[in-house]
Each structure stands twice: as structure tokens, then as C-alpha cells.
Image (cartoon, grey):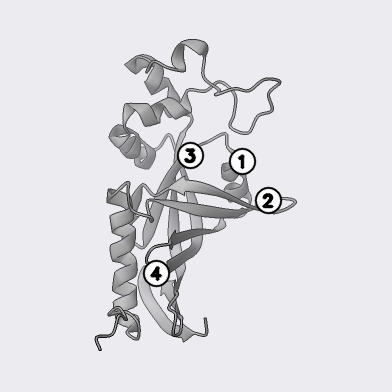
Amino acid sequence: MKSDKPDHYDNIDNIYETIWHLLDKGKKDINSPFHQAYLATHSELYPSIRTIVLRNVNSKDKIISFHTDIRSKKISEILSNNNISILFYDHGEKIQIKCSGRGIVNNKNENSNQSWAKTMPFSKKCYIVDEPPGSTSKIPTSGYKKEHEVELPGEEILNSGYENFTLVNMEILEIEWLYLYRYGHRRAKFIINNKNLEKKVWLTP
């Protein structure tokens, strides 16, 4: 009987290669389960978690990136404590990847400028809202001016959003892998130091 175990089941090197393959696919393919992920930061009262979109993957420098508004709470939390984690999960393949490391905020610099230039107009629209994300409101609101709710604003208005647009890079220092399998799960951990894989170990799931 042919085994349905994947190639990475008992091969830790294959797992590491698969991680970067899946992350890269998540960046490129909007239908990939790894295109969206969950960012965890430190806040004053509770751990803070929210969904982000994977925007860039650099396997050479061990960096993954997402976009956000400079006025959002996640930015103040990262600036206060830049130890962050990003969790990915593919329900179909039963694969979980947790990346942990340092958050690096890029606003109105060369890195954010390059990312802004590649951002689609409908995504740029997110950054033209007048009030900061998370602001209280007396009425249900999109944050947009009425004239911008349905129609896409002109280029000049869209580009005004660059003031708020922010690229956050995560410098990955640890990666944890979990694969759920009916006859026995597999879990592994990878330690990265100075952009190089320093240590790889199996963990009990």
C-alpha cells in the first residue's frame, strides 16, 4: 500500500525548503492559504493579534513583509516592543508555520517608497482615510469620505495616502513548523542567526 506521507514527514531539511516555498507562493498567489496570516504584537493589557497580507518574502535575508497604516496600533506596539510573531495555517494541508523575530518599521523611506510604487490603486485607497484605524465613531463608517466610498479617487488623492503607508519587515529569528497527520504529527524548529540557519531540531508536537 502506497504511503500518503509527504516527502517532508521525516526530513527536516525538506521541511525547511518547503517552508520557504510555501511562503513565496503565499506572496505571489492570492488564493494561497499563506497569502494571509496572523500578526501577534505586545500591547499594554492583552496580547494583540490581527490578520495581515503577506507582501514580500526574501529567503536570502530571511525577511517577510506586510503593509499597514503608520497610525495603527500595531505600529505603536512594534515601536514599543519589536518582538513579533506571524502565524500561517493551511487547513487543507494541515500545515502551520509560525515565524518570530524583529519588526522593522519603514515609513517615508526608500523601502516604503519602493513598496508604494508596486501597490495597486485599490490598495492605496486604504491609506486615505482621515481618522486613524481603530478610532471610535458614533456611526458605522468605512473611514472614507462619501465621494470615495464607491469610486476610486484620482491619482493625486490616492498618492496623499503615502503619508500613512507603512512597510513592516520582519527579520525572522525563529521558525516553528507543525504538520498534522492522523498517525502522528510532526513539529520542528529552526533558529536563524545573522541571516543563516544556525540550528534545526525536532520538537514533540
Q: Residue at x 55, y 58 (%)?
A: 84
How would you rate the neighbour count of disc 4 (Cα within 10 Å): few for under 14, some for 14-19, many for 20 or more?
few
Tell whether 118 sits left or right of 162: left
Question: Residue type at mark 3?
Answer: Thr
Task: Give the residue at mark 4.
Answer: 194
How would you rate the neighbour count of disc 3 (Cα within 10 Å): few for under 14, some for 14-19, many for 20 or more?
many
> Mark 2 or 4, which is nearer the eye?
2
Task: Give the residue at mark 1.
Answer: 73
Residue 94, labelled with which disc?
none
Q: CA distance from mark 1 to mark 3?
A: 10 Å
Is any atom of residue 59 visible in this view?
no
Question: Residue type at mark 2?
Answer: Ser
* Outermost left residue: 2
Q: CA distance from mark 2 to mark 1?
A: 9 Å
Q: Earlier in the sequence, mark 3 or mark 4?
A: 3
Task: Give the residue at mark 3.
Answer: 68
Is any atom of residue 96 visible in this view?
yes
Q: Earlier in the sequence, mark 3 or mark 2?
A: 2
Q: CA distance from mark 4 to mark 1?
A: 29 Å
Q: Earlier in the sequence, mark 4 or mark 1?
A: 1
How would you rate the neighbour count of disc 1 (Cα within 10 Å): few for under 14, some for 14-19, many for 20 or more?
some
Q: Quadrant of residue 74?
A: top right
Task: Give the residue at mark 2.
Answer: 43
Q: Would you place residue 106 above or below residue 125 in this image? A: below
Determine the secondary structure under disc 4. loop
Kindly check if marks 2 and 4 are in contact, taking CB atoms under 8 A apart as contact.
no
Place of residue 123 in the rendered image (x, y in percent of width and height, measured from the top left): 38, 31
> Mark 4 or 1, which is nearer the eye?
1
